[in-house]
Amino acid sequence: MYFSGTAKTSIEAKANRGAIDILIPIYFQDIEKECVDMYAFINKFEIPTFMEDYVFHKIHDFYH
């Protein structure tokens, strides 16, 4: 993930969302819903904390 630390531009946010959209199905394909650890995913890919809500919703969508 790319995060400048000072500016959350719309381009950065769009790139980060796109990366998350690609990574979630790959990362969680062999993980049962009951075993999901969102924070392990966030830490593994160094996703900025301000994107936690987006990750939560995308994981939820993936399993439903």
Image (cartoon, helix red, strand yellow):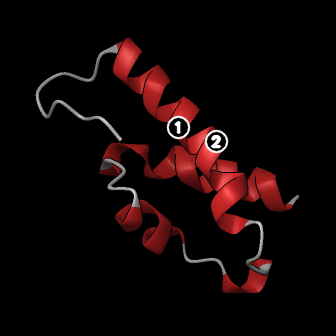
**Left or right of 56: which side holds 59?**
right
Q: Residue at x 39, y 57 (%)?
A: 45
Q: Residue at x 42, y 44 (%)?
A: 51
Q: Residue at x 46, y 25 (%)?
A: 15
**Left or right of 41: which side holds 46?**
left
Residue linked to disc 2: 22
Q: Residue at x 37, y 50 (%)?
A: 47
The answer to whether 11 is drawn above or below residue 45 in the figure is above
**Left or right of 47: which side holds 57?**
right
Quadrant in the picture for residue 56: bottom right
Q: Which mark is residue 19?
A: 1
**Label 1 vs label 2: CA separation?**
5 Å
* Residue 34 placement (x, y as % from top left): 75, 85
Q: Which element type, helix, strand or loop, lies under badge 1? A: helix
Q: Amino acid at mark 2?
A: Ile
* Residue 54 placement (x, y as % from top left): 54, 43
* Count of marks placed on residues: 2
Q: Amino acid at mark 1?
A: Ala
In front here: 31 or 39? 31
* Residue 55 placement (x, y as % from top left): 55, 51
Quadrant in the picture for residue 44: bottom left
* Residue 23 placement (x, y as % from top left): 60, 50
The answer to whether 5 is drawn above or below residue 56 in the figure is above
Q: Which element type, helix, strand or loop, lies under badge 2? A: helix
**Left or right of 43: which side holds 38?**
right
Q: Quadrant of the C terminus?
A: bottom right
> How crowded is the residue under tag 2: few (<14 C-alpha within 10 Å), some, or many (20+)?
few
Asked if marks 1 and 2 touch (Cβ < 8 Å), the reply is yes
